[in-house]
């Protein structure tokens, strides 16, 4: 795959997953609501699965992995805030926060050749699942984790 933003978009996957793991782990740790804790942990599991798939992809394609340390620190700070703020506000921020990542992941998916299409389709789908979760939580839909659990094979 070769387009001008390719390397930056690929790195954004790594940044997103490291950030997401830190956000969701921290939010789960600071929340007092057991149900919400389980939801944060399901999102964390999805981010961990996606990170592992990304690292496998990078290894298989022989590409260099650059650790996004600042994204992890940012995730811890923002996860603490999300875990303590009112749920509706947290879900709005989570939903809206997926949009910049979706843009880049969709671009990767759209430029992928047939051998890479499945991986990049998954990366995009995982971000859409997080958005769907937040939107369903805002709608008080009890099946808010359906897309997340589907990707996790649950």
Image: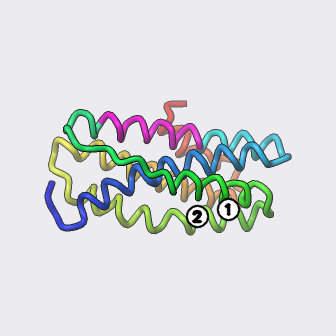
- Mark 2, residues whose alpha carbon is within 10 Å: few (<14), some, or many (≥20)? many
Q: Secondary structure at mark 2?
A: helix
Of the 4 image quadrants, the one containing the C terminus is top right
Discs 2, 1 touching: Cβ within 8 Å: yes
Tell me the residue at 20%/38% (across/down): 62
Residue marked by disc 1: 91
- Mark 1, residues whose alpha carbon is within 10 Å: few (<14), some, or many (≥20)? many
Question: Is residue 41 found left or right of 148 in the rendered image?
Answer: right
Residue 42 drawn above or below residue 89: above
Q: Is residue 9 magenta?
A: no
Label the magenta part by its dominant secondary structure. Answer: helix
Tell me the residue at 40%/49% (across/down): 14
Tell me the magenta residue range: 44-56
Of the 4 image quadrants, the one containing the N terminus is bottom left
Residue 32 drawn above or below residue 77: above
Residue marked by disc 2: 95
Q: Nearer the viewer, residue 70 or 142?
A: 70
Name the spot of residue 97 as percent of width and height, x first.
Answer: 55, 65
Q: Residue furthest top?
A: 154
Quarter assignment of residue 11: bottom left
Residue 49 drawn above or below residue 4: above
Q: Is residue 48 magenta?
A: yes
Distance (Cα) linking label 2 and label 1: 6 Å
Question: Is residue 25 found left or right of 67 in the rendered image?
Answer: right
Tell me the residue at 38%/66% (across/down): 103
């Amino acid at each position: 795959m070769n387009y001008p933003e390719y390397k930056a978009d690929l790195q954004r996957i790594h940044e997103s997953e490291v950030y997401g793991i830190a956000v969701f782990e921290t939010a789960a740790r600071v929340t007092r609501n057991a149900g919400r804790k389980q939801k944060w942990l399901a999102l964390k599991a999805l981010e961990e699965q996606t990170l592992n798939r990304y690292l496998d992809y990078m290894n298989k394609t022989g590409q260099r992995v650059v650790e996004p340390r600042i994204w992890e620190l940012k995730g811890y700070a923002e996860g603490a805030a999300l875990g303590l703020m009112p749920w509706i506000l947290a879900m709005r921020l989570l939903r809206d926060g997926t949009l910049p990542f979706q843009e880049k992941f969709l671009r990767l998916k759209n430029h992928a050749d047939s051998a890479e299409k499945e991986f990049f389709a998954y990366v995009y789908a995982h971000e859409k699942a997080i958005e769907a979760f937040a939107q369903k939580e805002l709608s008080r839909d009890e099946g808010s984790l359906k897309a997340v659990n589907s990707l996790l094979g649950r």
